[in-house]
Image (tube, rainbow, N blue to C red):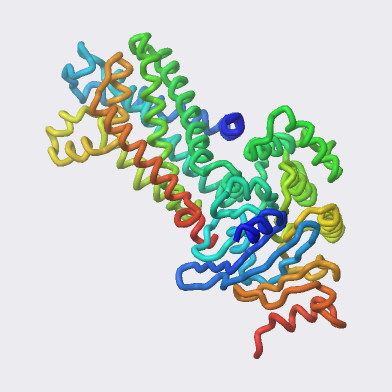
């Protein structure tokens, strides 16, 4: 048992085991299990209502499941929520910015919420904004930014505390094609640099053949594996539709 | 430990920044009690005779009588305003950011409560200064001794706002809360008329007023403004603050309250 525990502790990715959740009598997630290793980009693909947002709420501790375990960078979310959330970066589907504050003020607020020392905050904000080409916008009110820049800023903010696991819930919804491409590429690069990424989406063109893929449908994992292997000779969109369409 | 203070500073600082960005809110918070003080009280001055009751040692004008009630009214409205902004934050998503901080949820909520209480107190002191300009003054030291009462009252009414925000599903439902919480709490209290006066018309109403925690916030402030402590009021306010803070933490518990709904 101690060996198993040690092995778990050394895992720096994301691990979900036997996770279930229901809203009253409606089952939202039904005993799902999966793992995402560090350095992997895992796409969580599912149609609307599949349970993606519930899973995101459970992974971010906004909800607590009566059954199942979540480990973030080796930390059990139920037993050690502080450590687990400290290693998690999140970009929610819904914007979470304070429009009346500047980019820098929003970032500094987040840095404090994650307990970053004040002396390091400004340097980290500058570095995070630099990575996404946003440094020159630091003094602007968020209200003045377009949708793409707001999303980039949220991504920069999610990386401020150097998380080991990055969770993004439909981060490109409402963005133009170029911005979508740029954000998708950037997050793939982050995964290549060693970050563990879980990217929830219903858009198949954001997923690459080398990505790990989980298909979530009606609260269950329908398929899991490497995208290229799963889709075979078909387009991912066709394959995905064949997996999730309701028989007439 | 410095992380805890950093979080407190950030959350309170954000509340303050939001407050100064909403000048209308500040003006409304001052106009409301001033209207009661300068118009309502002037009209009722002749109609209501007040006997000498503690903590007063002489006859007082009606304007002087209602100042503590109006201070508490500022705290009450601000508590409800913070409830409104919590519901707004939930709808706009920024509540998620707060609640996914690795710090304990009770601490995050308490910091937010402290921030809104600090803003309430700032408004109360501004109101007291304006009242002073119109010649309605308290004992000079009373402005200092009332501070702990304002902190406690602000925490209690702010915590009530937190509890309500965990129950209100949508922003649109907020008007109902105003009608069913603010007005009964304010009118069924000793803010506008002493309880003995209320008993003359209805002993039942007087009993209801005596059970209303808001009455005790008003009385705590009234006595502290005159350098005295109303121990019963203090006990009521402390007890209610503890209960409401616990209820707020329960309401925001991820395993049951606020987020359990699918929104």
Q: Residue at x 55, y 47 (%)?
A: B88
Residue B144 location (% of width, % of height): 40, 14
Q: Residue at x 38, y 35 (%)?
A: B156
Q: Is residue A109 visible?
A: yes
Q: Residue at x 43, y 24 (%)?
A: B124
Q: Give B221 or A6, whichever is nearer the viewer.
A: A6
Q: Is residue A174 visible?
A: no
Residue A221 location (% of width, % of height): 66, 74
Relative to A166, say whether B35 is above or below: above
Q: Quadrant of the N terminus of chain B?
A: top right
Q: Give B257 or A105, whichever is nearer the viewer.
A: B257
* Side of B261 where A151 appears, left or right: right
Q: Give A38 or A119, whichever is nearer the viewer.
A: A38
Query: Which residue ends up furthest to the front in the rendered image?
Result: A2
Q: Give B224 or A88, whichever is nearer the viewer.
A: A88
Q: Residue at x 48, y 53 (%)?
A: B258
């Amino acid at each position: 048992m101690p060996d198993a525990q040690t092995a778990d502790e050394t895992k720096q990715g994301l691990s979900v085991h036997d996770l279930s959740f229901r809203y009253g009598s409606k089952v939202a997630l039904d005993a799902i299990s999966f793992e995402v290793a560090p350095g992997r980009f895992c796409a969580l693909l599912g149609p609307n209502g599949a349970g993606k947002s519930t899973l995101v709420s459970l992974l971010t501790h906004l909800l607590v499941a009566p059954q199942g375990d979540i480990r973030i960078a080796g930390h059990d979310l139920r037993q050690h929520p502080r450590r687990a959330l400290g290693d998690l970066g999140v970009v929610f589907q819904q914007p979470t910015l304070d429009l009346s504050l500047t980019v820098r003020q929003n970032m500094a607020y987040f840095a404090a919420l994650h307990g970053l020392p004040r002396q390091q905050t400004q340097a980290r904000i500058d570095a995070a904004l630099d990575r996404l080409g946003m440094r020159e916008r630091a003094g602007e009110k968020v209200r003045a930014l377009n949708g793409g820049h707001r999303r980039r800023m949220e991504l920069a903010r999610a990386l401020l505390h150097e998380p080991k696991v990055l969770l993004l819930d439909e981060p490109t919804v409402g963005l133009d094609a170029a911005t979508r491409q740029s954000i998708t590429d950037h997050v793939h690069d982050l995964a290549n640099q060693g970050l563990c990424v879980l990217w929830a989406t219903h858009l198949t063109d954001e997923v690459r053949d080398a990505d790990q893929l989980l298909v979530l449908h009606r609260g269950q994992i329908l398929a899991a594996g490497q995208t290229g292997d799963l889709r075979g000779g078909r387009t991912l969109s066709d394959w995905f539709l064949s997996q999730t369409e309701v028989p007439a | 430990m410095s992380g805890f203070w950093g979080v407190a500073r950030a959350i309170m600082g954000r509340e303050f920044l939001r407050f100064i960005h909403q000048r209308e809110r500040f003006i409304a918070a001052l106009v409301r009690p001033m209207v009661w003080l300068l118009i309502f009280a002037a009209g009722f001055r002749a109609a209501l005779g007040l006997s000498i009751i503690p903590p007063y040692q002489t006859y007082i004008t009606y304007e002087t009588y209602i100042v503590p009630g109006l201070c508490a009214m500022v705290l009450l409205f601000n508590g409800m305003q913070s409830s409104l902004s919590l519901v707004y934050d939930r709808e706009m998503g920024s509540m998620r950011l707060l609640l996914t901080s690795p710090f304990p949820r009770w601490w995050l909520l308490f910091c937010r409560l402290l921030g809104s209480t600090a803003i309430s107190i700032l408004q109360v002191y501004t109101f007291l200064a304006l009242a002073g300009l119109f010649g309605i003054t308290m004992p000079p030291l009373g402005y200092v001794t009332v501070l702990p009462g304002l902190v406690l009252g602000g925490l209690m009414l702010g915590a009530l706002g937190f509890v309500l925000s965990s129950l209100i599903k949508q922003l649109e439902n907020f008007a109902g809360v105003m009608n069913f919480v603010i007005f009964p709490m304010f009118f069924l209290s000793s803010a506008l008329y002493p309880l003995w006066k209320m008993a003359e018309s209805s002993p039942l109403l007087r009993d209801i007023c005596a059970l209303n925690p808001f009455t005790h916030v008003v009385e705590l402030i009234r006595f502290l403004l005159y350098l005295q402590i109303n121990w019963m009021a203090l006990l009521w306010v402390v007890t209610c603050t503890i209960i409401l803070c616990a209820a707020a933490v329960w309401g925001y518990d991820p395993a049951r309250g606020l987020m359990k709904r699918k929104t």
